Image (tube, rainbow, N blue to C red):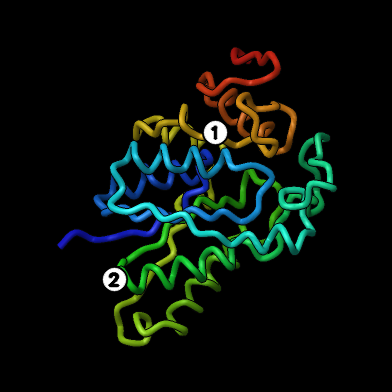
Amino acid sequence: MAKKAVVVLSGGLDSTTCMGIANHEGYELYPLTFSYGQRHDREVAQAKKVAAYFHAKKHRVVDISFFKQMGGSALTDMSINVPQDGVGNDIPITYVPARNMIFLSLASAYAEVLGAEAIFIGVSSVDYSGYPDCRPEFIDSMNQTINLATKTGVTNHRLSIQAPLMHLTKKETIELGTRLGVPYQLTTSCYNGGDKACGTCDSCRLRIKGFQEAGLVDPIPYQIDIDWNL
């Protein structure tokens, strides 16, 4: 019987790299995409393309749009402007309260029903925007929690959260994904969600920097001219 993995798939660069890793490791893929009231639906559209590319066994899109009703983040509240000043030292207004904790809780329930062995999530504590739910302490804690809170965990069939990008820079993530043939042309990272990435939001800046440092050209279009030969 094939081993199974639930992949938290946003349609972005990091989660798509995780799909490539899980695929390379021989898992049967069950990506889970969350429509959480984000500013645009481009993420969900691209996630569907990524799932199709990897011939996912089953791709589920889960509506948890109460995040939009709750507000409190520039990614879910249209009255809050997406910052364009670059990544700082404070937790940015693009942080969505407890997002990854909720994603992983739902993913663990789905994984338990599937009999999956692993949940893949593309968080990194190196090149990131300062979100508290992207740190190794959080992933370690959730790993322990899901094995205390599920039938799977307490009956010795342990479920493991895999965060293979945790200690990689964006450059290293892109290099790894490129070696694995990850379809970065299908991904989206821009917080603003246009047909062309803005190139100035925090997420775009981190992505551009990663491709530049890797000596590669990002295959997605941008609204601004970018020198890829730095």
Asked if the residues shown at circle 1 and circle 2 are in contact, with their CB atoms under 8 angstroms apart, the answer is: no
Please give left or right for residue 121 compared with residue 95 in the image. left
Q: Residues within 10 Å of mark 2 (few under 14, many from 20)?
A: some
Residue that numbered label 2 is attached to: 115
Please give left or right for residue 67 compared with residue 35 in the image. right
Q: Earlier in the sequence, mark 1 or mark 2?
A: 2
Q: Amino acid at mark 2?
A: Gly
Please tell me which residue is depicted at 63% across the width and 59% down the height of the picture.
65
Residue 145, percent across and down?
51, 79
Please tell me which residue is depicted at 28% across the width and 71% down the height of the picture.
115
Please give left or right for residue 120 compared with residue 155 in the image. right
- Secondary element at tag 2: loop
Q: Amino acid at mark 1?
A: Lys
| Front residue (pair 121, 136) | 121
Considering every residue shown, the one lying at the far left of the view is: 1
Quadrant where the C terminus is found in the figure: top right
Q: Which mark is residue 14?
A: none
Residue 72 picture quarter: bottom right
Q: What's the CA distance linking mark 1 and mark 2?
A: 34 Å
- Secondary element at tag 1: helix
Residue 11, percent across and down?
50, 42
Residue 207 picture quarter: top right
| Front residue (pair 15, 64) | 64
Please give left or right for residue 29 compared with residue 178 in the image. left
Residue 51, percent across and down?
37, 43
Mark 1 or 2: in front is 2
Residue that numbered label 1 is attached to: 171
| Front residue (pair 131, 73) | 73
